[in-house]
Structure formats: C-alpha cells, structure tokens
C-alpha cells in the first residue's frame, strides 16, 4: 500500500505542534556553529600559513653552512617554483674617515623575498617604502644605525672586502629578519652577484647559505620531500611551522578555544535535539496509534517520520550553513584590519563537517526516540496505559555518545580536547546519579501536600524523582559546558593580556659596554624611559660533557655537539623561567654551577649533575649542571640558554643587555641614543608587539562572540530540559486546581521544585566544569590552570534563577488556562 | 462478515493468569448492526480490539470477510484495517495538530486514495461541518469533534465500523444527535456496525445485542 501522505505534509502539519520548531533551531544552531567556526578556523589556518611564509620570506627554505647544491636550484626551477638565494655572513665594513664596524651582510639574488616585502628608505630615518627589487650590483642598503657608525650618507661608498659599493638607501624591514633576537651586528644588504669580487667568502668562512622556494603547496611539498633525504650535516629544511612568529602562537590558542566552543555548542545542540525529539515522540504516541488503527503500517510510519526528519535536517542544514557563512564573515570583519595577509579560501572541509554534524546529531540523538514511535501498538487507541515509547536503550546511548565523540574528534582534530570533555561529562553524570540517589530518594511523602507551596514542591521533587534525576543531570551538563567555555575564555584572555601588559618592553638593547652602562642608564632616565635590569651577556661555547669532548657541528652525526650561546648570570630564577629538575643555587655558595635550558641541555646530552666544560674567548672552565629550566619564549623578556652564578662568570669580559618600553612619541629618542652610543645594537619590537596586541584584542572579541553563541545553545538545552519534564506537571497542576488548590501555592511549589533542580544542577556543573577546565588548561591548551570560585555561586544562582523562571513560565498554562481545557488535552 | 471462533485472551499476572475473554463465538453478517453491552471491566473493549485486529488473541480465530486475522502479522492486519475497517472512539482520537479536514483526509492518504481532499470535504458536509473544515480539534466542541471522527470513519468507505462508547464523553442531547448521525450514515453506506456501549438506548438501536459479563458473551433476544 502506498501512502499519499508525504513527509512535507507531515512536517507542515506537525510544525504547528511547536516541538519541531525547537528541533529545527537546534539543528540550525549546530550547523551554523560548525560551519562558521570551522570555516573561520580553516581560513585562519591558511592565513597563518601565509603569515608564516612571510616570516620565512618563502614557502620553504633550505639553510646550509656550505654552498647550495646547484642541482636543487635547477630542480626547483624545473618544477616551476619561484627561487631565490641568500648568503649571510659577518664582516668588517669600512666607511669614511677610517670608521669601520662589524656588520651582518645579507647578499640576495633577484626575486628575494619570495613572500613578504622589503621596505627601504632614501636616508637613514626618512619614510620607508616597500619595494619589489633588491640592491643592484655595485650598490648596498644599510641599516639606519650603520650610517652613523660608518659616518656615511646616501651616495657615499663603503668598502666590503676588496669591493667599494655605493650606499643607495636604508634597509628598514626584511621579512625573514625575525626569529633569533641575537644578531651579529647591523644589516648591510647587497647583491649576491657582488660577493665573489669582495673576496670575503673563502672556503671555511662562516656563511649561512639559503635557497628559498615558493609556489603551489603540493609542488613545494613534493620538492621538500625530494630534498629532505639528500640533506647532510649542517643543512636544514625550514617549513612553514618554523617560520611562525608569536602572533601565530596566540592565534593558535584562539583556534583551539574556538574549536572547543564549537564542539560544545554542537554537543549542547545535540542534547537539545535528544530532549526535544523525546518529547515529540511522547506527545505523538497517541497520534501514531490512531494512524495505525486507521491502517498505517510500521514501515510506513518509520519512513514517513524519517523522511520528515531528513527533510527538516536538510532545510536546517542549508539555513545553518548560510548563517555559519555569515558568522565567519563577521569574525573576519572583526579581524580584517589586523591580519597581515588576506584570509585564505574556505575549502570543502567545513561543508563536510556541517553536513556530518547535522546527520549525526539528527540520526544519533533525535531519531532513536522518534523511531520507536513506529512500535506503538494500535491497541493504544483503546488502552492509554500501553505503548509508551519507553526509555532510551543503553545501545542507543552508546551509539549517540560514540558518534558525538567521533564528530568532536574529527572537528577539533585533538583527541585530548575530546577526552577532557568526555571526562567532565562522565563526572557530571556520575555525580548526578549519586546526588539524586542521596537527596531525591528519602522516604516517599504521603499525599500531594497541597496545603503549602513548600511541602507541595518537596513532594513533587520526590514523586518525580526518576524524571527529576535525569532532568537535573541534563541541566547540569548544559551549565557545565557553559561554565567550561566561560572559564577557558577568561583564562585565555587573561593569559594573553598578562603576556604583553601595557608598557611591556618593546626595545632590546645589546652590546652595552660595562664601562658605559651607567651613562647609558642615565641617558634613558633623562628621557623618562623606565628600564629593566641590565643582564650580562657573554658569548661562549660548551665543549665537553663529563670530560668527553663534544664534536663540532661539522663532525657531529646527529648526536650531541658543541653549542655556542650567550651566557648570563643570575642569583635567582629568572622571571618566566620554570625549573624542571634540580635546584637553584643559594647565594654565597662558591661552587661552579650552571643552569641549562631544557632543549639546549638535550642538544649537548647533559643532565643535572653532569660536569660541563666551557670556552669563553679561548679560556676554559668547568661547572656542574645544577638544574634544567623551561623558558617562555612568548614572554618578550630577555631569555638565556645558559645561566651561571655571578661569581663564575664575573671574571670574563662581556657586554650588557637590557630592554625598555618606548612609546611612539618617544621614538626619536632612539636616534639620539644610537648617535650617543654607536656600538649599542637596538632591536625594535614595537611594531611586532603592536601587531600581536591588536590581533589578540580582535581575536578576544571573536572569542566573546562565540562564547555568546555557545551560551545561547546552553540556554536552548535548559529550555528543552524544562519543557521535557513539563507534561506531567501540567496535568497534575490542572488537577490540583480543579480540586481547589490556590494559584499562588501551585506557582510557588513549581518555582521551588525547579529551583531545587537548578541548584542541584548548578552544584554538579561546577564539579564537572572544574575537572574539564583543569584537563583542558593544563593538558590541551597550554594554559595554566586556575580554579574559578568566583563562577561557582554564579553557576548555582544562574541555574536556580534560569531554571525556576523557565519552569514557571512554561507551566503558566497550568495556572492560567481553565483546568478543564488542560485536563481534556490529557484525556 | 465478522466471525470469532473460540476466542480467548489471557494476561499473566503476579499469581497466575487472568482470563479476560473465555471462548467467545460470534458471527455478524454484512450490513448488520450489533451492540455489545456490559459493565466496566467485563472485557467488551478487549473483544472489540481483537475483532478489529488491534490486538492478538491468546487462542481462537477472528475473520473479517474471508481474511483470518489470527494468521496475519501486524502489518498485514494494518493493511486490512486500511481497506475494510473504520473506528469511532469514546475520546474521539483526533490528531491535535491536524485540522478537521486533515483529520478526515488521514485514512484516505494512508490508503493512497485519489483526491483525498474532495472525498473528505464531502463527508464533512454530510456530518454538517463544512463550515469548520480548517478548525483544529481544540477549537471544536465535543459533539463536533465526534462528528469529525465519524466523517473520518466513513470517508475511507470501510466494510466494518467499530465504535467504542461513541457517546461516552457527550451529554445526552449531543449523544442522541451523534447516534442518529452514526446510524444514518451506517444505513446509507451499508456498513457492518459493531458497537461497544453500556448505554441501553444506544444498544437498542442495533439489530442484535450481546451482553458481556466476566469474559463471556451471550446474545440477548430482541
């Protein structure tokens, strides 16, 4: 028999019932969140990649201590990749009137940089402009400070080795200058074709050769894969990740948060769907029994409702997809002015994810209770007591849980994040079970106790204890997820702000000679510039561990090797450093000890207690490893691989390093300083810091937006949870009113019952949320865990107020509509 | 024709088995009207459920026409109900989300009938509700709702109509009108009518009367 009743007709008719509206909103919300956030995140990802390329000046770079193999260059060109070469070396450059200075020369080929751009100015401090060319042969660009140090102006000549080169301008920005803060002197940029004539680069000279390539992603990848096995000692392939600046790190955490919120919103929407679908099914058992008594077959009912659900899902997916598209556009509009490169393309993944989300949440959460409708016996038309749709089966719950976990995993690509959420939810459910056993069990009250709101409310809590336990746990899960998002968002933003507080140092000064340090500090003070302490900085090398000599890099076979680094001293653990093992030295001890950064320690194969041999400018000494530290490279503070007690390092000659904050208006002071102290090197990070702070501010705003959407999803679940428990209350209250119970007492009892559920849910949610936040902050998002007791009363009070008011408003029909009308609906 | 042969229905209870129907034999010819009367709990609604194929008997057989319901599964019985059976219930059993017209169209749509709207409209006209077609059940009085239910029962042109206390939820005057309507339609459509009631006046309108007591059925002499 072929029914003429179509899914569209069914949907159109059932829409009036109200439950489908909530189901529809839940699907739209889930899809919009997934679509919006995954699109935003995937475009952000490609933006970050572009940004990283800019910091590499290429898509991939082969860095080598020996001349680049020309076969590689030709292979890259054959593959259709854009190619450029650079050579970086230090040499003494001679200016006018015998002035000379050790400079860091970068010789570049045409097309450099392949990503990002150079900015040059005509004179040392005139307005910089971006350029797509490099210095032509015979010309150089100097760092602004070199003009002063070499006593030259634009148009003058400088001597590099045997070759005289004309100064054509000042080099102000180069994309791949970042990374190491420790330079070897101010920059001189020249054409690579001039290098042989200078005679500076000889076999054995310390030169860093780079081959830069850029092009289509898959071509670059193929090229990289081919080169990798051919690399020898002293050669490295730098891919995009290595070029990521600290902006990328900040955005990466934001990405983690957004994916987390997205997962939570989907989870919340799925929970709302399950609740709404169950209520829909409960309210449709009679209709289905009638349809079956009129001749509808089981399969016919199943197909009809499944088609209707899929149709609803498809429509909601289309609308949710559109809204998600708008959401990500909105998020990008917020960031538009701050992103250094244009956002990347959308790609197909978000569409797949959005479709899968709708399908999984509908089929795993909404479908099971609706599917059971087909099993309602037709005899229910005569006997109302049979054919209720029954409880969720364990297998259905398991499938729903697993499919949701799988979806979240796919979505966030982070199993730890998924596991953290599942742990938190399981704890909430477990505690919910225990709490409901403890408090809602008690002895069953006799009668309805309709004389007082208080007693009536308590009696209601106990009478419906099974349903109330489920409602409370579901509400607790919703509040828990909302709390988690709020907690993570708060600690994320706090951490960002703490990392770069207003007035944090944005200029680093190196090579301050000890004898001019006090004059230098006074000069800063005179200009009202607050300084950080001066850190000693001495260049040295680790040459042996436990009397075993370390090989030089040329001879090391991938194992421990000699390392050169800047040494410093400190009597206390430096700020932003964390001791991983060992102990810090106490003042007054004169044993030679040393503190190593963890990565550095592993590269030389040293552990706490090992005896190291150091070499500073030819003199050797020994020290024992006292401890191993972790550094926070995001801190924008001077950081050192190797730190000694003062007495160990004090006898060696060294320079000092400090940092200070300079506002935009104070910038001209810098020129005066450079003139006054020509040997001092200044690293200007103000532009980079401004850029990071602006992006962090904008991303914080995006995070706030997403937080609100997630909270909305949570409220939706609360509403669905309260609604789901409504029918029995509605009927009972109508009956009590018919029997003469006063309106105030009924409303009071309802408010009390829901407030108690809200309070219970609030308490449960706090426990679950703290556990989840702890796992997420400490294990997943690389944030430090902080419990948030200030949110606890908010969770409990919020639970009480929201749930009690939803409950009373949803039940108002029981106290406002004539009892007979309500009762007739339940006959 | 409806026929029951040695029909029993038992349900397991805590201390053994409860016999609801004990060996019922019954035959009602096409076009006949029959009333089953009895006190609450006598088993008359259970018998109606079995005769209409809404439930399965513990033993014995039920026939509607030549079809043996006892040999059919639920889906086959549903298909038979769609073709042959109509219902009128005490609590009307209209779908609340559907308008009066849509409620009447429902069995026609389920059976795949052509132009269900036209047929449904004509039946609503016959029960005097052609001006309330777009109204929803909660906007209609009890009598009006039962009239919609009667229109729905006859619209699919069933050969057998089962009515379970059709006036049970109505006042006397409205109940009387509903009975008139039911019999009028029954006569003009030549439907076999099986009625369960404890209203003696309603039972008296039927050609045959049966009395149900403690699970046993006995025909009362006219």
Image (spheres, rainbow, N blue to C red):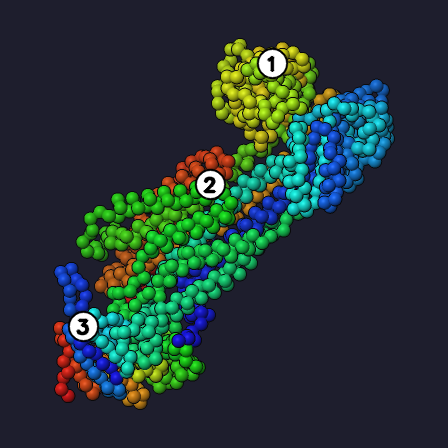
Q: Which mark is residue A416?
A: 2
Q: Are marks 1 and 2 on the same chain?
A: yes
Q: Position of residue B139 (x, y in %)?
A: 36, 74
Q: How many marks?
A: 3
Q: Quadrant of the C terminus of chain A?
A: bottom left
Q: What residue do we see at 34% from left, 75% from top?
A: B79
Q: Quadrant of the N terminus of chain A?
A: bottom left
Q: Quadrant of residue A71?
A: top right
**SS class, disc 2:** helix
Q: Chain of mark 1?
A: A
Q: What residue do we see at 26% from left, 46% from top?
A: A437
Going from N to C along the chain, the mark reached first, 1 or 2, is 2
Q: Quadrant of residue A638?
A: top right
Q: What residue do we see at 15% from left, 60% from top?
A: B14
Q: Which residue is mark 3?
A: B8
Q: Compute the Cα span from label 1 to label 2.
A: 44 Å
Q: Are marks 1 and 3 in contact (CB under 8 Å)?
A: no
What residue occupies the far bottom of the structure in this picture?
Answer: B188
Q: Are marks 3 and 2 in contact (CB under 8 Å)?
A: no
Q: Which residue is mark 1?
A: A649
Q: Are marks 1 and 2 in contact (CB under 8 Å)?
A: no
Q: Chain of mark 2?
A: A
**SS class, disc 1:** helix
Seen in the picture, residue A425 relative to B118 is either above or below; the reply is above
1 vs 2, front mark: 2
Q: Position of residue A25 (x, y in %)?
A: 46, 59
Q: Position of residue A605 (x, y in %)?
A: 55, 22
Q: Quadrant of residue B171?
A: bottom left
1 vs 3, front mark: 3
């Amino acid at each position: 028999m072929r029914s003429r009743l179509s899914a569209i007709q069914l949907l159109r008719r059932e829409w009036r019932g109200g439950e489908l509206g909530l189901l529809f909103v839940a699907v739209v919300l889930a899809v919009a969140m997934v679509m919006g956030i995954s699109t935003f995140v995937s475009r952000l990802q490609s933006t970050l990649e572009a940004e990283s390329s800019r910091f590499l000046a290429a898509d991939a770079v082969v860095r080598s201590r020996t001349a680049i193999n020309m076969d590689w260059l030709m292979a890259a060109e054959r593959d259709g990749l854009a190619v450029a070469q650079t050579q970086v070396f230090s040499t003494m450059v001679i200016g006018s009137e015998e002035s000379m200075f050790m400079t860091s020369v970068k010789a570049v080929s045409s097309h450099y940089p392949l990503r990002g751009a150079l900015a040059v100015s005509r004179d040392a401090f005139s307005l910089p402009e971006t350029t797509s060319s490099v210095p032509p042969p015979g010309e150089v660009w100097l760092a602004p400070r070199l003009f002063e140090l070499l006593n030259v102006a634009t148009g003058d000549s400088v001597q590099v080795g045997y070759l005289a080169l004309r100064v054509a301008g000042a080099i102000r920005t180069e994309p791949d200058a970042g990374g190491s803060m420790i330079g070897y002197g101010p920059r001189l940029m020249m054409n690579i074709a001039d290098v042989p004539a200078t005679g500076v680069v000889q076999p054995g000279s310390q030169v860093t050769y780079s081959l830069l390539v850029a092009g289509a992603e898959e071509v670059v990848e193929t090229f990289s894969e081919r080169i990798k096995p051919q690399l020898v000692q002293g050669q490295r392939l730098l891919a995009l990740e290595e070029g990521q600046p600290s902006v990328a790190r900040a955005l990466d955490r934001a990405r983690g948060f957004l994916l987390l919120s997205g997962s939570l919103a989907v989870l919340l929407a799925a929970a709302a769907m399950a609740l709404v679908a169950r209520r829909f099914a409960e309210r449709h058992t009679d209709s289905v029994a009638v349809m079956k008594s009129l001749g509808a077959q089981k399969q016919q009912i199943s197909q009809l409702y499944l088609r209707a659900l899929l149709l609803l899902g498809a429509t909601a997916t289309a609308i949710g997809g559109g809204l998600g598209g708008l959401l990500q556009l909105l998020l990008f509009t917020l960031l538009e002015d701050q992103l250094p490169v244009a956002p990347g393309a959308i790609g197909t993944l978000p569409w797949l994810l959005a479709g899968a989300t709708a399908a999984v949440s509908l089929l795993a959460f909404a479908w099971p209770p609706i599917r059971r409708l087909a099993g309602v016996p037709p005899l229910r038309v005569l006997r109302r007591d049979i054919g209720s749709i029954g409880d969720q089966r364990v297998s259905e719950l398991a499938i729903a849980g697993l499919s949701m976990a799988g979806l979240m995993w796919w979505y966030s690509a982070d199993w730890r994040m998924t596991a953290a959420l599942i742990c938190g939810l399981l704890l909430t459910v477990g505690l919910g079970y225990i709490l409901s056993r403890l408090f809602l069990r008690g002895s069953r009250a006799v009668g309805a106790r309709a004389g007082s709101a208080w007693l009536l409310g308590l009696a209601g809590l106990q009478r419906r204890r099974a349903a109330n336990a489920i409602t409370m746990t579901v509400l607790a899960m919703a509040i828990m997820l909302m709390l988690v998002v709020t907690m993570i968002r708060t600690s994320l933003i706090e951490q960002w702000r703490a990392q770069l507080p207003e007035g944090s140092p944005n200029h680093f000064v190196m090579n301050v000679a000890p004898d001019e340090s006090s004059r230098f500090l006074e000069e800063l003070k005179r200009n009202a510039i607050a300084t950080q302490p001066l850190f000693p900085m001495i260049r040295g090398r680790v040459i042996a561990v436990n009397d075993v000599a370390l090989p030089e890099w040329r001879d090391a076979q991938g194992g421990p090797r000699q390392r050169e680094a800047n040494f410093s001293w400190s009597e206390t653990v430096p700020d932003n450093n964390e001791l991983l093992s060992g102990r810090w030295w106490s003042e007054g001890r004169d044993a030679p000890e040393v503190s190593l950064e963890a990565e550095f320690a592993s590269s030389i194969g040293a552990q706490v207690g090992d005896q190291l041999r150091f070499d500073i400018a030819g003199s050797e000494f020994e020290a024992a490893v006292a401890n191993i530290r972790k550094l926070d490279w995001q801190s924008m503070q001077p950081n050192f691989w190797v730190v000694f007690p003062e007495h160990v390092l004090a006898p060696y000659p060294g320079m000092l390093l400090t940092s200070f904050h300079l506002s935009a208006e104070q910038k001209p002071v810098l020129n005066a300083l450079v003139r006054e102290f020509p040997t001092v090197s200044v690293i200007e990070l103000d532009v980079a810091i401004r850029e990071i702070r602006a992006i962090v501010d904008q991303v914080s705003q995006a995070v706030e937006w997403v937080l609100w959407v997630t909270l909305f999803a949570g409220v939706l679940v609360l509403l669905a949870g309260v609604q789901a428990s409504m029918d029995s209350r509605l009927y009972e209250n109508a009956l009590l009113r018919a029997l003469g119970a006063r309106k105030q007492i009924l409303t009071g009892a309802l408010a009390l019952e829901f407030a108690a559920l809200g309070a219970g849910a609030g308490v449960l949610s706090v426990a679950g949320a703290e556990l989840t936040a702890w796992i997420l902050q400490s294990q997943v998002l690389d944030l430090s865990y902080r419990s948030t007791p200030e949110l606890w009363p908010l969770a409990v009070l919020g639970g009480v107020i929201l749930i009690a008011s939803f409950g009373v408003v949803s039940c108002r029909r029981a106290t406002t509509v004539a009892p007979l009308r309500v009762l007739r609906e339940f006959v | 024709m409806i026929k029951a042969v040695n029909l029993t229905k038992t349900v397991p209870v805590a201390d053994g088995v409860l016999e609801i129907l004990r060996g019922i034999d019954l035959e009602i010819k096409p076009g006949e009207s029959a009333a089953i009367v009895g006190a609450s709990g006598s088993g008359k609604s259970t018998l109606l459920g079995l005769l209409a194929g809404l439930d399965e008997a513990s033993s014995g057989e039920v026939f509607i026409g030549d079809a043996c319901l006892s040999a059919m599964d639920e889906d086959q019985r549903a298909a038979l109900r769609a073709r042959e059976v109509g219902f009128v219930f005490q609590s009307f059993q209209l779908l609340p989300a559907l308008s009066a017209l849509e409620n009447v169209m429902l069995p026609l749509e389920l059976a795949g009938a052509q132009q269900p709207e036209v047929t449904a409209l004509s039946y609503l006209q016959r029960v005097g509700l052609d001006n309330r077609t777009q109204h929803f059940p909660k906007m209609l009085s009890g009598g009006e709702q039962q009239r919609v239910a009667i229109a729905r029962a006859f619209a699919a042109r069933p050969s057998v109509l089962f009515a379970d206390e059709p006036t049970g939820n109505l006042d006397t005057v409205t109940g009387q009108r509903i009975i008139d309507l039911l019999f009028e339609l029954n006569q003009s459509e030549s439907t076999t009518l099986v009625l369960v009631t404890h209203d003696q006046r309603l039972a008296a309108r039927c050609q045959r009367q049966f009395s149900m007591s403690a699970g046993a059925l006995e025909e009362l002499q006219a």
